[in-house]
Amino acid sequence: IESRIRHYFGLTPQTSLTDSNIVAALDARFAVGTPVSSFEAWARVQGLGTDGHSSTWQTNNSLNYQVEDYSDSFFSMRHISIGVDFDTNAIIKGISACVYSYSL
């Protein structure tokens, strides 16, 4: 399952799954000023929001992705969400990530 998560964001096995690493990987691909449609197309190819293990939704100026929670140890689950903020011209203003673990 962790390999699927890494595939979503283009992270190597050596890169820890943290907010900052996910944002850095996405920022490297989608700088501020990139059309949000480029991010959406890439996310679909990665399976993010389309593979049954993640979901996506959009509000006025934000595109959001939720990765299905998965186990990172025997009693712990990991939660990952991504937000892509864009302006009225559908141009990316910023990308954020939230990664946290919780116990069952």
Image (cartoon, rainbow, N blue to C red):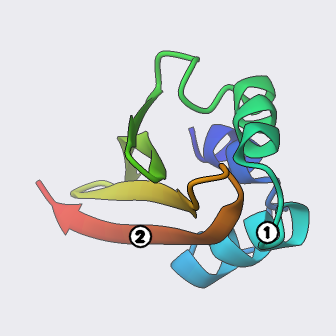
- The residue that disc 2 covers is 98
**Residue situated in front as seen by the camera: 11 or 72:** 11
Q: Residue at x 68, y 25 (%)?
A: 47
> Is residue 68 placed above or below 60 in the rendered structure?
above
- Residue 58, given in percent of the width and then of the height, sits at 41, 38
Q: CA distance from mark 2 to mark 1?
A: 14 Å
- Residue 102, given in percent of the width and then of the height, sits at 20, 65
Q: Residue at x 66, y 52 (%)?
A: 89
**Residue situated in front as seen by the camera: 52 or 38:** 38
Q: Residue at x 45, y 53 (%)?
A: 62
Q: Which mark is residue 25?
A: 1
Q: Which mark is residue 35?
A: none
Instruction: Give whichever of discs 2 and 1 has the lower sequence position.
Output: 1
> Is residue 10 placed above or below 8 in the rendered structure?
below
- Amino acid beneath label 1: Ala
**Residue situated in front as seen by the camera: 37 or 25:** 37
- Amino acid beneath label 2: Cys
Q: Is residue 54 left or right of residue 94?
A: left
Quadrant of the image containing the N terminus: top right
Judged from the image, the secondary structure of the residue bearing numbered disc 2 is strand
Determine if residue 25 is in view. yes
The answer to which quarter of the image holds residue 70 is top left
Quadrant of the image containing the C terminus: bottom left
Determine if residue 14 is in view. no
**Dot 1 crowding, Cα within 10 Å, few <14, some 14–19, many 20+:** few
Judged from the image, the secondary structure of the residue bearing numbered disc 1 is helix
- Residue 57, given in percent of the width and then of the height, sits at 39, 34
